[in-house]
Amino acid sequence: MASISVDPLSKVIVKSQSATIQKDRLDTSMICLQYRDDVHVTFADSSTVSADSLEIFVKKNEAKKIVFKSNVCMNRNNQKVRADVVKLFVEEKRCELRGHVLVEQMKEQENDVPLKTKCEHARLKWDSEEIELVGSEIHPVSTTIEFGGTLRVLRKNKKKKKA
């Protein structure tokens, strides 16, 4: 039986110390919801995000862009992401992460590859789950991958010698 995937944006619960709702300055048909101080978000798929601030741009009852700023920490299943700024472009189905980006995946299922990647900037396409990582000369993309098992080269030969 095929599993039914939940649209994470079908329900968004936001908690924070303060909030402001106003029309966007550039597009008055767009509403901007701003949340500040200790922002915690839970999406319909149970993924969570915490940040110092959040802006959600809504037009015709649809989220168009979501921006998390400062100390952003995202958790989804066995994946964790940290960054200074995370922008979700809903219509384009893409995500941009900027500043001190850390992407971690832990091994929960047989096919999961435990890894930890650090970079300065990352772009994620939701449809293909393709991620582009960008570093710099000073801060290159750095990845640690844990391959399970032991190396066969290092195994001791247990064959008995013939006398």
Image: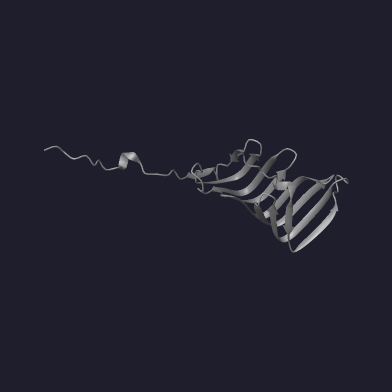
- Residue 40's x, y, as percent? 69, 58
Q: Residue furthest left?
A: 163
Color theme of the render? one colour
Q: Residue furthest right?
A: 28
Of 124 and 79, which appears nearest the observer? Answer: 79
Q: Quadrant of the N terminus?
A: top right
Q: Quadrant of the C terminus?
A: top left
Q: Residue furthest top?
A: 128
**Image side of residue 142 versus residue 33, left or right:** left
Residue appearing at x 64%, y 40% in the figure = 124
- Residue 12's x, y, as percent? 73, 52
User: Exactly how many numbered labels are in the figure?
Assistant: 0
Q: Quadrant of residue 50?
A: bottom right
Q: Is residue 13 above or below residue 129?
A: below
**Image side of residue 59 versus residue 135, left or right:** right
Of 149 and 102, which appears nearest the observer? Answer: 149
Of 1 and 10, which appears nearest the observer? Answer: 1
Residue appearing at x 69%, y 40% in the figure = 94
Residue appearing at x 65%, y 46% in the figure = 97
Q: Residue furthest front?
A: 1
**Image side of residue 110 versus residue 92, left or right:** left
**Image side of residue 26 versus residue 121, left or right:** right
- Residue 152's x, y, as percent? 33, 39
- Residue 114's x, y, as percent? 50, 46
